Image (tube, coloured by chain):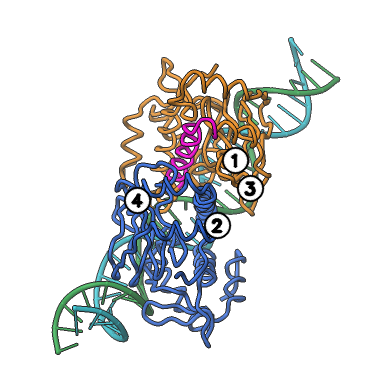
Chain colours: A orange, B blue, C green, D cyan
Amino acid sequence: MMRRSSPTLAGLGPVDRTRILAAAHSIALATRDVLAREGDPARVFYLVEAGHLKLSRLAHDGSEMVIRFAGPGDQFGGIVAVGGATYPFTATASEPTRVLAWSRETLHDLMAACPKLRANIAAQIGQNFNEALTRLQETATERVEQRVARALLRLAAHGGVPTTAGLSIAHPLTRSELAGLVSTSLFTVSRLLARWEADGLIASKHRHITVRNPAALAALAGASREAR
Amino acid sequence: MMRRSSPTLAGLGPVDRTRILAAAHSIALATRDVLAREGDPARVFYLVEAGHLKLSRLAHDGSEMVIRFAGPGDQFGGIVAVGGATYPFTATASEPTRVLAWSRETLHDLMAACPKLRANIAAQIGQNFNEALTRLQETATERVEQRVARALLRLAAHGGVPTTAGLSIAHPLTRSELAGLVSTSLFTVSRLLARWEADGLIASKHRHITVRNPAALAALAGASREAR
DNA sequence: CGTCTCTTTGAAACGCGTCAATGGCTGTGG
DNA sequence: CCACAGCCATTGACGCGTTTCAAAGAGACG
């Protein structure tokens, strides 16, 4: 059903779980399909079954800021549960993706019948809020190199795929998207990754990145100054 | 009771309102008193009656990032309503302040009896989340000058006091705090404000700032390049 | 009335964005 | 299956907005 356990459905009894899943309908997305746009009326709550969504915002100058990637088990549109009017960001499939969908009405019925569901969704929102604050702080106080290193570690840790070469990030990721994720330019990212690849910290091919030396990356993420 | 109407209590009938307020107890804070610290167990929900709270986070390098200022009618600790474990930031009184307080248990009883209260609190959280994202985006794409100009306008608009000289920001605000609010250094803020004061855009005395020419500030906030 | 916080101002260094130009890989369509 | 079109990545040079460091002045609060 779902490759990872979902925080949204955690701690639910089999009965609730079954009823909730039975009320959903499934949607298939191709790469680059847009599930919902920033500012759209928030009418549907989603849970990723397989694949990945890129959640992003568009700056008025046209540049894209990536908020996070949602993989199997992750929710999108929690705002629907708390009565918000519009989606705060755009969700785009970054690879072929399947999501479960519930209408606002259905979701409210389910939450009324199962308070734990409401609590889970709210907890996710709170956590996302906290992460946004942390990122705001990191962007303000840390240098680009540290932020990129940490972003790679987080992406690899959150659903990374173990391979012989190391821990591989689970979804396609361009330099530009990585730049949007840490608020820098794609050029700076490209330079850093090129250097790290030469040093054996990572391996990179097309739109995929594998972390080979997490310890060294963690050192870069923590240090304010370093050699080379 | 409260100088401004509170979004948290908006749309409630007089009966609910009275019951909710009757369940609160009031707390007085002196300048620099800390109401709650980032990471503390979230056990109490607060509503500002009078005065102002500064909500901030401490970076690991010791610098302070200011999230926002909470004035009369604003809530702090909404996380309590959605089951979060700890406060995401520190609340400090930036002037003599009075707050209303509800324990977690009391709040949950009230929300169960009055769903609109839960919805209001959740809506506030959603809005704060959205504002954090907007700020993240502005920090990434705009220059310091624009961000400071916009911050002044927002602070003046949110509870500003009209005076003969212009719209005065409602609470004490140091250069350092303003810097923390827009993610820059206090030096850069000082330079900008000195220039703007010389140009008659603002007036500044000790820890108080008055906006004299909002239109000119708005122009600075919107423009990517300008003269002088 | 002194101490402490807040503020100002200058000079210098630097990280990173910007611009430009080229090369590579991919998925699509003939 | 091959080729073209388009997206993705690389690399160097340059400039500029901001931070950093230092040192001194001003106002406020106890």
Q: Quadrant of the N terminus of chain B?
A: bottom left
- How far across and down, in percent of the image, does residue C26 sit? 64, 23
Please name the amino acid that badge 2 sits on. Answer: Leu
Calculate the distance from the C-alpha at mark 3 to the C-alpha at mark 2.
20 Å
Q: Which mark is residue A80?
A: 1
Circles 3 and 4 on the same chain? no
Q: Which residue is mark 4?
A: B103
Q: Is residue A44 left or right of residue B187?
A: right
Chain letter belonging to callout 3: A
Q: Is residue B149 visible?
A: yes
Calculate the distance from the C-alpha at mark 4 to the C-alpha at mark 1.
27 Å
Q: Which residue is mark 3?
A: A85
Chain letter belonging to callout 1: A
Front of the two marks 1 and 2: 2
- The magenta segment is A112-132
Element under disc 3: loop
Q: A146 or A15, which is in the foreground?
A: A15
- How far across and down, in percent of the image, does residue D18 sit? 44, 62
Q: Which residue is mark 2?
A: B12
Q: Residue at x 31, y 55 (%)?
A: B36
